[in-house]
Amino acid sequence: MKDNRLKIIILFVVAALIGIFFAFDLHQYFTLSELKARQQAFEAFYSDHKALTIAIYMTVYIIMAALSLPGAAVMTLAGGALFGVWIGLIAVSFASTIGATLAFMVARFLLKDYVQNKFKDKLRAINDGIARDGNFYLFTLRLVPIFPFFVINLAMALTPLRVGAFYLVSQIGMLPGTLVYVNAGTQLSKIDSLQGILSPGLILSFALLGIFPLLAKKITEFVKARRALSRYKRPKAFDYNLIVIGAGSAGLVTSYIAAVVKSKVALIEKHKMGGDCLNTGCVPSKALIRSAKILSYVRRAEEFGLKKTVMDFEFKDIMNRVHDVIATVEPHDSVERYTSLGVECIEGDAKITSPYSVEVNGRMLTTKNIVVATGARPFVPPIPGLDKIDYLTSDNIWNLNTLPKRLVVLGGGPIGSELTQAFARLGSSVTQVEMAPQIMGREDPDVSAVIRKKFEDEGIRVLTDHTAKEVIVTEESKILVCEHNQDRVEIEFDEILVAVGRAANSKGFGLEELDVQLNPNGTIAVDEYLHTSIPNILAAGDVAGPYQFTHVAAHQAWYAAVNSLFGKFRKYKADYRVIPWATYTDPEVARVGINESDARDQGIEYELTRYGIDDLDRAIADSENNGFVKVLTPPNSDKILGVTIVGPHASDIISEYVFAMKHGLGLNKILGTIHIYPTLAEANKYAAGEWKKAHAPETILNWLARFHQWQRR
């Protein structure tokens, strides 16, 4: 409240001073003709009162610069005419920089919070760029006097650039232009117009000077790259343009793109083509979930007007189907297919011996570029006693042939939640243990509550705020000991599935010896172009992050391939603006953009539109009428900030929102699009309709009601 009052006072003072300047036509005293007419009088006063003249001059200059008033060029000329080149340069340099900094600080105080909150999503990339290279940007702009300095002051005030950096860079950057004007001021009698000071040749010189910081940045990057590579001998010729390590989603797509553009590429995989997604992740888990869902439908037979029945099955047959599904999909990622596409596929353990060489199966392969796409593995926490049993992870659970009677699932994330429900539906007595206050911690609490209720309705024991402390193994039993509110909780089990997250596979194949930088979480540190700390080694997929999704790995692969092969000519920043994902529980949870929790954490103002799928005709006909669509928009705008869908086929119907966000389409466009009836996708249109109802123009509607009433007379 105090800040708002102070903002109003400052705004009033600034407006009043600017108003006085123009109301009393003070601008007439800051013209070239006025300066030339009074030059002798100013010089006489300066001769008698040197210090006072400089103080008055600098004060007036600071005020004019701080208020962004016209006349700065004339004031600079006056500095040269009165004080000569060097005193004038010092006086103008400090006065103009102090005034610009005051303008910067006032604009920041009045506008930054409002602009950053209102356009935070749009400004994120700009803020990141300023944080990295803001000094370069400002220095470049200051060197070119054709850019209005008051615009630069305002624009930079809205960014995270530090005040001290703004002042220092501005003072240095404005010096060349200031010197030109001050020097021109010493020849005031010969100047007929301000335009004449900056000749086309001089403007071109400044423009070239403005390019210097960017050129310096490129040179710095080049020098850093050369320094990183200087320890290693560069081969005279290379066996490959690109070597890709890891044949998961990122590695397959990277090598495919490289082959399409006719480069010579080798793809090295030590285990199975297709990586985790095909062999231990997306494909087998969705196959298992499908079988479990069929069983759930059988148990619900009476809801569909069918006689109650019992489905007879053997767990090993379901697991055999899972492996059959893997085998059916496998040719898509096979050695044969990729060889036919022009990729040389090599099975073996890769060892990066230098930025230019990779050793595999006793062969030393040379390459211009390397892409690391080694994926991730299940993270196993150091729980005492866990190493005494054959625990399950998402890697080895597919080897089960006997359904666990009592299964503990450690972890409430997507993998843990999906397998919790699937095994419970197949007949296991499942206890899900999560140390956080809710399962599915990345989602909003109301989303987590829906899934938890569904789990509990299906007989799953869900324990949140429970921290696993120990595994006790006796001849008769296996027990997981947890702590909950300082109480000891014991859970007996036959099998335990550890699903608490995934760790990047970033060690063991040469990166340590090359001192490639890692992030604190173990992923490989990459820049916006996916380069590691060694510029011709790139990383993509789960090993790089920041998102561990198969579709993001494939998305990153394009950037890794193009930047590695063509980066010296043109580089592309990886685009993470619209990242969707889904958790394949029943009901499914799909998400794109921010949710309510994100908005609150990031201080983003939003309006919430909610549509209940229980009202949707197709969902009712399918007896799947549960769940909702939540859409976040800025206040009084139909722009989509984020969407969460809980319901049947949520992972499919969210695609419309993904497309809309990617291409800047709002809810009005979705509302105006014909959707097939009856479909689940109509939920998107009805959600848009809910937003429209909430933003109906009540005043216009009231006048229309009066108009129609008048028409009936």
Image (spheres, rainbow, N blue to C red):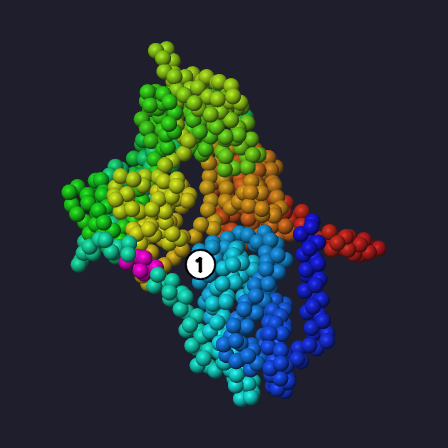
Q: Give percent across and percent down for residue 561.
A: 32, 53
Towards the viewer: 676 or 648: 648
**36 shown above or below 225:** below
Let me know if residue 225 is in the magenta part.
Answer: yes
Q: Where does the C terminus fall, quadrant-wise?
A: bottom right
- Judge the density around disc 1: few (<14), some (14-19), many (≥20) Cα neighbours within 10 Å: some
Image point (52%, 56%), residue name: 162
The residue most toward the top is: 476
Name the element at disc 1: helix
Image point (47%, 51%), residue name: 577
Query: Is residue 543 visible to the viewer in this orientation of the structure?
Result: yes
Quick check: 233 left or right of 555? left
Say which residue label 1 marks: 133
Query: Is residue 367 visible to the viewer in this orientation of the structure?
Result: no
The residue most toward the left is: 362
Please state which amino acid type lies under the numbered disc 1: Asp
Which region is colored magenta?
221-226
